[in-house]
Image: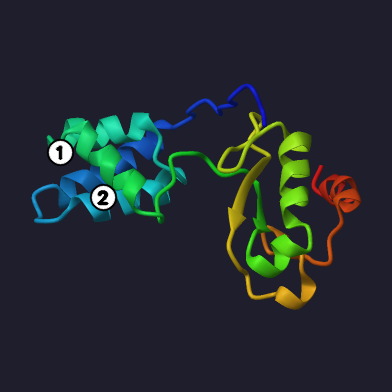
Amino acid sequence: MLSKKTSVPFRGTEAQEQALLEVIREMKDEKGALMPILQKAQDIYGYLPIEVQKIISNETGIPLEKIYGVATFYSQFTLSPKGRYKISVCLGTACYVKGSGDIYNKLMEKLGIVGGECTPDGKFSLDACRCIGACGLAPVMTINDDVYGRLKVDDIDDILAKYE
């Protein structure tokens, strides 16, 4: 697919770091605190970049490898930022049979990212999902709360233009 990996630089603020440190101070001595700390950290930053994981490790004494293992094991956590416009393409059976794979590929090509990534400007992120329950509209994608159904590859440019 794409040959180069794109990344969005970490842009954490002092206020976010202070909020995280407060959460850690309140929870670090509780049994089983790692999951709630990670959840709060993701609420604060929107995702769990390595910089945030290192802060948690340094402040709690939990090895970075364990934090990374938990953050990558549970699907509720993401290591990549999400864009202002979150695109999700259904790759469930009904949508896939009707061409959602081609739509997903077109979006990767058009945005210059692969699934799970965010464009460098932070505008769009792209993910796949398995079913959004709109099989009668297959193939389907969402951008934030907007649902687009009965898609064709040729629809992508016009749809993305609405968000530019």
Q: Residue at x 56, y 29 (%)?
A: 8
SS assignment at label 1: helix
Image check: 16 left or right of 3? left
Q: Going by the picture, which residue comes out furthest to the front?
A: 97
Q: Tell me which corner region of the image, top left, top right, bottom left or bottom right, holds residue 72.
A: top left
Q: Which amino acid does label 1 sit on?
A: Thr
- Binning the other alpha carbons within 10 Å of mark 1 as few (below 14), some (14 to 19) or many (20 upward) gives some
Nearest the viewer among 11 and 137 is 137
- Which residue is under mark 2? 37
Q: Position of residue 139 (x, y in %)?
A: 76, 64
Q: Residue at x 26, y 50 (%)?
A: 37
Which residue lies under the disc numbered 1? 60
Mark 1 or 2, nearer chain start: 2
Q: Quadrant of the C terminus?
A: top right
Asked if the residue at tag 2 contacts the one at tag 1, i.e. Cβ–Cβ closer than 8 Å, the answer is yes
Left or right side of 66 for 90 = right
The spot of residue 162 in percent (x, y) is: 85, 50
